Each structure stands twice: as C-alpha cells, then as structure tokens.
Image (cartoon, helix red, strand yellow):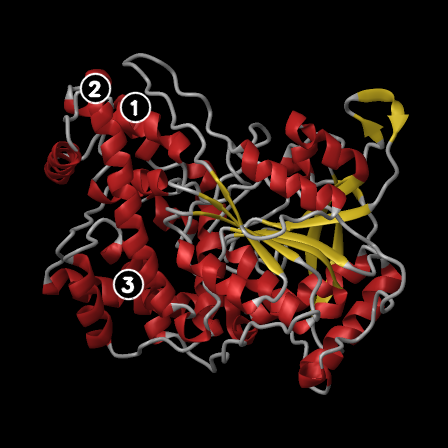
Amino acid sequence: MRAIALCSTAGSVLLSALVAAPAGGPPAGAAPARPLFADSAEARGTAEAARRAAAAGIRFGVCAKDQEVPGSLQCGTVTVPLDYAHPGGKQIKLTVSRVKASGKDPHNSKRRVPRKGSLVYNPGGPGASGMYFPLASMLPEWKRIGAAYDLVGYAPRGVGRSAPLSCQDPKRLLRGPAQSPASPSESYKKERIAEAKAYVRGCVRHGGSALRHYTSLNNARDLDVLRAALGERKLTFMGASYGTYFGALYATLFPSHVGRMVFDSAVNPEPDGIWYQNNLDQSVAFERRWSDFRAWVARHDKVYGLGRSSADVLRSYEKARAQLAAEPAGGKVGPAQLQGAFLQTGYYDDYWPSRAQALSAYLKGDPKPLIQQAGPHPEAAADQENGNAVYTAVECNDASWPTDWSVWDRDNTALARVAPFETWDNVWTNLPCAYWPGPRQQPLDVRTAPGELPPTLILAAERDAATPYDGALELHRRLSDSVLVTERDAGAHGIGGGANRCVNGHLDAYLLDGRLPEGDAVCAPHAEPKPLAPGDRAKKASRHPAVR
C-alpha cells in the first residue's frame, strides 16, 4: 500500500496506546503457544531470539547526533536474526527510541502516576520509521499517556539505521520534472516496464541474499523480540496502516503474548488480496477521496476561483497538468510532481487548503507555492529511497504477483476508466513485483478464535483512501472479540489521536482503562478544514511519523 512518509514533532495526529502487563502468562522469551506454528523452524528461532533479547535488554542512551532530537528521546538497539529459521546465523540490529514515562499527572502536578509499561507503535509502510513517535509525549493530548507509559518507536528491518536496504542512488529521485499520463501510450508503458526491471536489478545488487528476508512475517517476529527486549510479558501495540497488517499477523502468531492492540486504518488481511488486489482497491478508494477534495474546493470557490463544481475543479487541475507538461514550473514541477503533491490530499484533509491555494496561485500566474509544495526535496531523498526499497522488498516477498504484463495492463486499463487519478501511478510503484526474483511467501490466514485473543480495538474512517473501509470490516470479522469504531463520512488516514474527540474518547477508554464499547461504535466526522485565502500561510501539517 503506497503512502506518504512524513515526520513531525508537533500537532495532534499521532497515535496513543497503553501497555498492560497482567500477572501470569508466559515469560518474556516464551515460545508461541499456537500448536500450528509451535514446531516450525521460524517459531523456534523466534523463541530463541526472544530469550536472548530478554536477557540482554536494551541499553538506551543518547541518540545519534544527526537525528537532531530533544534530549528526552533515548535510543538503543535490539538484535534479531536475519533469518528466523537459522537464529544462530547472521544478526541485524534494529534501532529503537523511547521517552520514559513522566510519572506526572498533567491535571494535578502533585499526583504521581505509576508506570504501567511500554507502548510500542508502528506508523505503517512498509518502509516507514517510528523513531520519532515517542516525541508525542510533548503534545498536550498525550501527556496522560506519557505519564504512565514509556513511548517506544523503532525502525523496522531495512529502515533507517536498521540494516538499511537500498535499490538505487537517491539522486535519481531528484531528477527533473516527469510526465504522468492518465492514459499511457504503449511506448510509455514499455519505458516503465524497463525501469521496473532495472529497479529490481538494483535491489538484487544492493540487497543480495538478504533481500528475501524482508517480509511482513519477519516484521511480526521482530516485534516479539522487541517485546522481550523491553521486558514486557505482554505486548501492547498500536499500528497504523501497514502496521495493522503485521500487527494482525502478530496477533495470529502470538496471541498469548498480546496485551492490548489497536489497529488504526486497517489493511484488508484477506490472503488472496495481499498485495495485488489491495492496490487495485486502493486506486478505487483514492478516486472517491479525490472527488471529496474537489467538492470541498468547489464549496470554497470564492476563495480559490477553481470552479463551482467538482467537475469544474477537475478541469482546473487538468489545465494545470497540461501547462506543466508543456512547461514545467521552475524547471522542477511537471505532471508527475503535481500528481504526487495532490495525492497527499487523499491521505489527510489538512493538506486540502494549501494544495488548493497552490493550484489557484499557479493558474493565476504565481508558481512559487506549487514549486514549494511539489518540487524535489534533496534533504529527504535518502530516506525516501530507503523507504521505497523496503516497501518494494516486503510487498514483493509477501505474496505472489502477476508475472505477465498483460494481466496488469488489462486490469488497470479497465480500472483507469473509472478511477484515473491514482491507478497508473500505483501500477508503476508496484510493477517491480512482477519481475521480483526468489521465493514468495504464502500470506498467513489472519484469524483468531473466540477467547484466544484479548479484546482489540479497530479504528477506521469510512472514506479512507489508503486503506479502504472494507479492510477494517474484514479484519473485524477475522479477529474475534474485536470492536470497530467508525468515523462516518470522513477519510483521514490514521484517526487515533487526531481531530475527532469521539474517536479519541473510545481510544483513551480502551488504552487507559481497558474499556471498550459494548458493541461497534460510530462517530460523527471531524470538522472540515478551513480554506486559506490568497497570501495566507498554511499551518504546518502535523502528521503521523509515517503512514503507508
């Protein structure tokens, strides 16, 4: 599932969670209890790695100087096997971050709050880092959580400093403006096929034999080793977007190790959908959310002058697209860069005002806002390339993909007739999987029996584009004793700890007090963003550390 990867230390659209460490249960390094997996080499390897991690713990200290983070953030590493079937073989180190529980009640400075454990969070991906998540403790909305819990983030295998994976020179991401045809020609398709094959060769060249070990199942196993290294008997975990998928794998593999789990903006775990069908479904959902954005812009035509209907706004966008194809803005922004910038409106509606303002200014003769928002950012190129490499490796390794281009062409040509906004760009992002070498995983059938897993919480926005709502419904069906909280008529990707007080009320009740609604719950949508008049400065969007 494709996504935006952004980091921020400000704002309120982060996630919260609670670690529960109930008495009893298996020791920190215990083997998985499910008989189905107990005898596998990977299960035995995970148990061995967890025992070693429990004994070693994590030595937290000062973070690397180039990370430029507050002193309250501590960093350390946990060692995991590259291949869980051979736990004594090559080892890799995953970087971990933490802000310790403050122990201070934010509403009563004289009251001390007892520490309850560690909260582990993953922001999505594949390929996103959660290293900045613990800085959520600085936000007012998180002070209660940060009083009682150590907030823990980490960089999954392949990401950042965690045995980083690369497939190409990051400078390639800074090359000049590019086209992004909604109806690609046969010659253009051949160019992109050649690029996909070249990209795979780069991944193989850089990753070597280790490449096949970047999988969602290994991410779930790594999570259990991290649990043990933190000294937690039970894991409390919150995953957003892709984080919900390997969180669900974890719940299936290690149900006896689960304390509390929150799945925010859930990936559809149906095995036959991983990942080819999921991406087709995503393109459909993005078309719907793209329409929502255009309708909002039309309602504010007096501000932006882009049209009084959704169709009018689309014509304005296509006009800009055509002009950029003929003459890129500042020599940097072409149709592909325009599309990339406006793709973000499908993830978060707090991008709507600034994107509409930039489009309006460009069509009125001022390209500067658009160049600023859509142009290349050299400082982020290395992280972006790394994230792309991990994304590709994990999704390609996780499941079988069509290897015949004619299947991709047939499916997406038909889909683009009704969902043109993201369809072909989604194809080009995932096409390396058609030519990926080596064995593919068989997706695990995510499923738990009644009473096998503690009650879990699923959060979903009804019009989420990146992880369509049907995914939350499917996960809910598969995880017994789960409860679903839905934000109606809204489409933000990652809603926990965000703008909706109703959602946050259910989240806090579960994580702080262990309370869930008696049945599935529905929340009214959060307020739409306010438009930005020409010349107004956009508020810096505050995002999850990353969501994919």
Q: Which quadrant of the figure has residue 425?
A: bottom left
**Left or right position of 68 against 270:** right
Tag 1 and tag 2, C-beta contact below 8 Å: yes
How many C-alpha atoms fall within 10 Å of the one at disc 1: few (<14), some, or many (≥20)?
some
- Pair 2/3: label in front: 2
**Left or right position of 276 against 9:** left
Which residue does the image show at 74% across and 42% down from the upper left? Answer: 512
Which residue does the image show at 16% across and 25% down from the upper left? Answer: 306
The answer for how far apart the CA atoms under marks 2 and 3 are is 34 Å
Q: Which quadrant of the figure has residue 403?
A: bottom left
The answer for how far apart the CA atoms under marks 1 and 2 are is 7 Å
For label 3, the SS is: helix
Q: Of callouts 2 and 3, which one flags the residue occurring earlier in the amino acid sequence?
A: 3
Q: Of callouts 1 and 3, which one flags the residue occurring earlier in the amino acid sequence?
A: 3
Q: Can residue 132 be spotted in the picture?
A: no
Q: Which residue is mark 2?
A: 366
Q: In terms of depth relative to the viewer, which is nearer, 3 or 393?
A: 3
**Left or right position of 235 against 27:** left
**Res. 195 mark:** 3
334 vs 445: above or below: above
Instruction: Name the kind of residue labelled 1 in the image.
Output: Pro
